[in-house]
Image (cartoon, grey):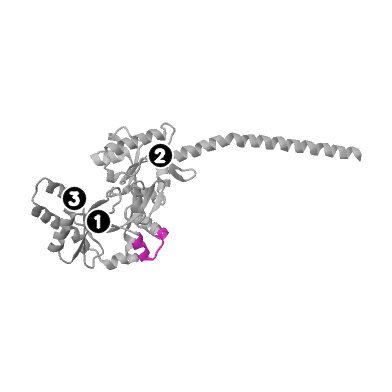
Amino acid sequence: MEYREFLNKVKSDLEAVMPGNEVTVRNIQKLQGMSYYGISVKPEGSIAAASLNLESFHRRFERGQDYRQLLDGIVNAVREALVLDKQISIDNIKDYDQVKERLTVQLVGREGNEDRLLTIPHHDMEDMSLVYHIDLGQMGGGTASMLVTNEMLHGYGISAEQLHRDALKAAQERQPFIIQSMDEMLAELMGTEPTEVSGTPDLFVATNPEKKNGAGVIAYPGFMEAAAEKIKGNFFILPSSIHEVIMLPENGTMAYQKLEEIVANVNGTQVLPEDQLSGNVYHYDCHERVFELAAKFVARARRKEEERPSVLISLEEYKAKSGSRKSGLSVSRNESALSM
């Protein structure tokens, strides 16, 4: 039985077992390349639906597991997911004055998320985008949240700019940024003193207290300035994952291309696809207060270097012309004195 045929059979059986719910087979749009074709179950009058990827159930069916046992497992999974919806007040979600205090942010890469980003408000940061969630608190043994969509934004009657400002303010109050040296972070994990950990004094990690979706802290007002002060100057930013970023001083000892190789290797071997942020490296210029791709920074610095000689030549030309004018004026004055 093909996967879609399996989904249609499950849909029919869920409608019989769970009357009063709208059951659909559809493409479930998710960020971070996690979209899938599955089942969505929405209770009548509900603001949310329980969406399930049934590929693992289909594989077990293909291997010969009893269908009735699989259906029981699917029903239990749907009911557990719907417990979350019962704890969400539709009135609270529709009231922006209540929502804005619970806003959080998440930084994601645009590559692979293009279609989903068309349906949600977002703020671009080079090849990454900041998106907004409503923190629903602890539910079902974990933390639940709801992604803010364009439809919700329209219902709130506010601009995307206001949502951005309110989300950063609420996120910074609830989940302030943390900047630690790599030694400090490792010492914290190992329960030792930073002096007992060796080898990475120039690497720094930025995240939030929960260390979940912590890469978004780089968008907080004042973050870049605080990081520059701790790092003591300009710095590169490596997108470790959507949960944190790594920073290191820009001191001329390492080309950004080498750093991009490191990011590519880490993404390919250590970071789950759904947690990957970007394959690029970024740079913060603390003097001009500019955050940009490292490649743009290098190109900008090169242009400045190329323009510098022309500025010096212009100054020399100006001095030469100025000297000629002064010389002419002097002759004119002498001639006038003689004629008198």
Q: CA distance from mark 1 to mark 2?
A: 42 Å
* Residue 255 covered by magenta stretch: no
Residue 105: x percent and y percent?
34, 53
Q: Is residue 326 above or below residue 136?
A: above
Q: Secondary structure at mark 1?
A: strand
Magenta-colored span: 150-162
Marks 2 and 3: which is nearer the front?
A: 3
Q: Which residue is mark 3?
A: 3
Q: Secondary structure at mark 3?
A: helix
Q: Which residue is mark 1?
A: 26
Q: Nearer the viewer, residue 81 or 3?
A: 3
Q: Nearer the viewer, residue 12 or 256?
A: 12
**Predominant SS along the magenta part:** helix
> In the image, what residue occupies the spot 87% across and 40% down?
336
Q: CA distance from mark 1 to mark 3?
A: 12 Å
Q: Amino acid at mark 1?
A: Arg
Nearest to N terminus: mark 1 or mark 2: 1
Q: Amino acid at mark 3?
A: Tyr
Q: Which residue is mark 2?
A: 236
Q: Amino acid at mark 2?
A: Phe
* Residue 161 covered by magenta stretch: yes
**Image quadrant where residue 255 sits:** top left
> In the image, what residue occupies the spot 83% across and 39% down?
332
Residue 107: x percent and y percent?
34, 49
**Image quadrant where residue 166 sits:** bottom left
* Residue 320 appears left or right of 276: right
> In the image, what residue occupies the spot 34% across and 52% down?
115
Residue 49: x percent and y percent?
23, 60
Residue 175: x percent and y percent?
32, 53
